[in-house]
Image (cartoon, helix red, strand yellow):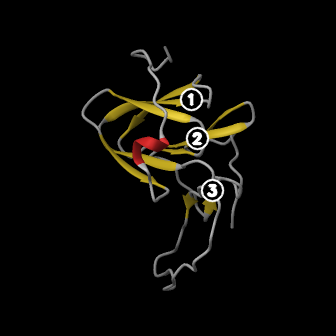
Amino acid sequence: MTLAHDPTSDNGIELISDGGTTLAYVVRATASTVSTSFFTTDEDAFQAGFVVYPSGGQVDAHVHLPVERHLVGTSEMLMVRSGHCYVDIYADDHRLVATRELLAGDAVVSVAGGHGFRMIEDTTLFEIKQGPYGGEAEKRRFATDTEGRPL
């Protein structure tokens, strides 16, 4: 079951958008749900949510069928495993749209636009992104000041 994210709810998930384009979701370590729900939309190139099972439940053994998909862009999820940082969320034109402080257990799911991280203390990020990944050839870096604002 896929449920749309309700930006007015206080469920620990924040939708960050710009001009109607979803850029990212910030998922707090405290985010939870009592039933299976996905906060990304069916149209996002990356689906993310919570799958909830009762004690004694199980996920039946399965394999995923080879389905060819055509994707534009690279979505990714980064979770703070340890440490403390800021994530800066940018529109495609490099405008800073939002800055959020992240603590251990918090995550950001990036589906469009750009992002950068500024570490407040030693930080380890756990990252998952679509592959195969072509490295630097797939990125356009841009300069920012110490507060994440583009120069």
Picture layout, residue 8 above or below residue 66 = above
Query: As shown in the figure, which amino acid type bears the numbered disc 3?
Result: Leu
| Mark 2 and mark 3: Cα distance apart in space | 17 Å
Q: Earlier in the sequence, mark 2 or mark 3?
A: 2
Instruction: Specify the farthest residue to the bottom.
Output: 61
In the displayed structure, 131 sits above or below 57; it is: above
Q: Relative to 112, does residue 61 appear above or below in the rendering?
A: below
What label does residue 71 carry, if any? 3
Q: Using the rendered view, name the quadrant where residue 141 is placed.
A: top left
| Along the viewing direction, whichever of 3 and 35 lies nearer the viewer | 3
Viewer-closest of 28 and 45? 45
Q: Are marks 1 and 2 in contact (CB under 8 Å)?
A: no
Image-quadrant location for residue 112:
top right
Q: Earlier in the sequence, mark 3 or mark 1?
A: 3
Closest to the camera, between mark 3 and mark 1, is 3
Residue position marked by numbered label 2 in the rendering: 24
Q: Residue at x 56, y 29 (%)?
A: 90
Q: Does the CB distance between marks 2 and 3 fall below 8 Å?
A: no
In terms of secondary structure, where does tag 2 sit? Answer: strand
- Picture coordinates of residue 65 (x, y %)? 58, 80
Q: Residue furthest left?
A: 122
Could you tell me how far apart the alpha carbons at marks 3 and 1 are, in whole angstroms? 20 Å
Which image quadrant: the N terminus?
bottom right
Q: Amino acid at mark 1?
A: Tyr
